[in-house]
Image (cartoon, rainbow, N blue to C red):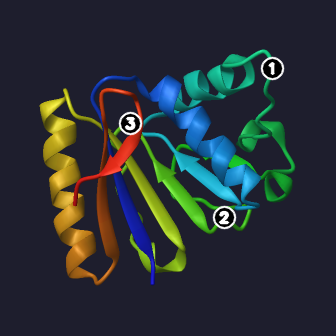
Amino acid sequence: MTEALFYHLDGQPLERVLPVLLQKSVERGWRVVVEAGTPERLAALDGHLWTFDDAAFLPHGTATDGHAALQPVYLAAGPETPNGATVRFLVDRAPPPEDPERYERLVLIFDGTDEAALLEARAAWKSLKERGLDVTYWQQDGEGRWTRKA
């Protein structure tokens, strides 16, 4: 059964949270695709993932890099999944895929301070739950740790 995890950003920006979640995914041997809401946001995330930590390396690529099938983390501006990913991250208000069941895990990261993003996340929650996905909601505590709220 596909898991859908909703991560509510409240105290930290996406640029701080996403690299950590992606590193954990790569450490587990998962192939990942990250879908951003716009090509501009995708380009900004691509640049950030190369420079977010001087002591870390997060292998990733985009369509412009070539060798998409070999990328453990592929950044997309649309529904493509050329690297055979079983985990799909949706950021910057990217919509859930039409076929969410093809993934083992969907990770929807949304900005809780953006009212439109919050409403879209609620609608996605309802839709994915109605489709029978195992849906969970995560929020950071005061220490920055993710805790399951629902």
Which quadrant of the view contains residue 55? top right
Q: Is residue 145 above or below residue 122?
A: above
Q: Position of residue 25 (x, y in %)?
A: 65, 53
Residue appearing at x 75%, y 40% in the figure: 61
Q: Earlier in the sequence, mark 3 or mark 1?
A: 1
Asked whether 119 or 104 is in front, the reply is 104
Q: Which residue is denoted by mark 2 in the rendering?
A: 85
* Badge nearest the viewer, 2 or 1: 1
Query: Does residue 99 appear in the picture of this structure?
Result: no
Determine whether label 2 and label 1 are within 8 Å by CB: no
Front-lying residue, 60 or 80: 60
State how far apart marks 3 and 1 are (Cα). 26 Å
Amino acid type at image mark 1:
Ala
Vertically, is 106 above or below 3?
above
The amino acid sitting under disc 2 is Ala
**Left or right of 45, for residue 137:** left
Report the Cα–Cα distance between label 3 and label 2.
Answer: 19 Å
**Disc 1 crowd, CA 10 A, few/some/many (<14, 14-19, 20+):** few
Report which residue position mark 1 lands on: 55
Secondary structure category for the residue under label 3: loop
Q: Position of residue 70 (x, y in %)?
A: 86, 56
Q: Which mark is residue 118?
A: none
Q: Which residue is mark 3?
A: 92
Tag 3 and tag 1, C-beta contact below 8 Å: no
N-terminal of the pair, mark 2 or mark 1, is 1
Q: Depth check: give the residue in front, 132 or 95.
A: 132
Q: Residue at x 34, y 78 (%)?
A: 133
Above or below, 146 against 32 in this view is above
Q: Locate the N terminus by quadrant.
A: bottom left
Instruction: Tell me the element at label 1.
Output: loop
